């Protein structure tokens, strides 16, 4: 969600969300395949690309995420039941937003082609205090498995000047030394798949 990458799509950055109510981590938009939807393929989410410059030096994106459990099965079942002359059954039709939702705003700003800042703001648009885990995710497009002689990309941490905190340090054989985010933050987790 809210994905962004460098000019060659080597280093990618996006968000994942977790509520504790859903059986899976929300890392991509949910949709129906051609045989699951009554009008073919259809994404059942609400997001907007709000604004951008042609150079992608500035981009703005918004997503509405329900605070109740996401109704994956309900959307599948009801859309399969409907015929091609019936209206589509949308996420809003499930009533999942009635008890509240989060408004997630993401802005990307580029100082130059390799210096990218991502800002995330989350607003609780519901009546109760709720918990949302927001996980910025940084990964490399897997080119090393099909490009002979290319080393595997890796990531790690380095000690940052800001109060001794740790910041992610992307590393790739031909891209070592890319700038990385400034500031001190939460514990960093690394997974190699």
Image: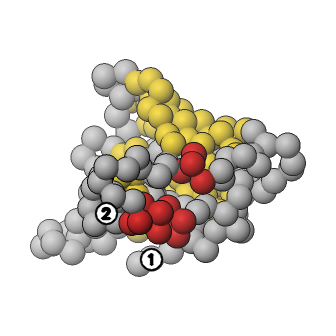
Q: Position of residue 167 (x, y in %)?
A: 61, 54
Residue located beneath label 1 in the image: 192
Q: Earlier in the sequence, mark 2 or mark 1?
A: 2
Report the residue at 61% width, 61% height from top.
Answer: 70
Instruction: Determine if residue 184 is in view.
Output: no
Please tell me in which quadrant of the rendered image residue 162 appears: top right
Residue contact between numbered discs 2 and 1, judged by CB atoms under 8 Å? no
146 vs 162, left or right, is left
Report the residue at 54% width, 65% height from top.
Answer: 74
On-image quarter of the C terminus? bottom left
Instruction: Determine if residue 18 is in view.
Output: yes
Residue located beneath label 2 in the image: 33
Front position among marks 2 and 1: 2
Seen from the viewer's position, the closer of residues 167 and 17 is 17
Please tell me in which quadrant of the rendered image residue 141 appears: bottom left
Q: CA distance from mark 2 to mark 1?
A: 29 Å
Q: Position of residue 132 (x, y in %)?
A: 72, 55
């Amino acid at each position: 969600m809210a994905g962004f990458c460098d000019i060659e799509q080597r280093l990618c950055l996006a968000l994942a969300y977790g509520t504790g109510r859903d059986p899976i981590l929300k890392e991509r938009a949910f949709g129906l395949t051609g045989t699951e939807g009554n009008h073919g393929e259809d994404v059942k989410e609400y997001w907007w690309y709000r604004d951008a410059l042609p150079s992608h030096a500035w981009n703005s994106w918004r997503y509405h995420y329900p605070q109740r459990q996401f109704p994956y099965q309900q959307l599948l079942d009801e859309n399969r039941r409907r015929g091609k002359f019936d209206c589509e059954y949308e996420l809003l039709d499930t009533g999942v937003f009635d008890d509240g939702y989060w408004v997630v705003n993401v802005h990307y700003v580029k100082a130059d082609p390799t210096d990218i800042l991502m800002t995330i703001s989350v607003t609780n648009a519901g009546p109760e205090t709720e918990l949302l885990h927001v996980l910025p995710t940084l990964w490399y497009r897997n080119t090393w498995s099909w490009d002979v002689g290319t080393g595997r990309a890796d990531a790690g941490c380095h000690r940052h000047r800001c109060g001794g905190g740790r910041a992610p340090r992307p590393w790739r054989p031909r891209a070592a030394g890319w700038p990385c985010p400034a500031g001190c933050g939460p514990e960093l987790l690394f997974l190699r798949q």
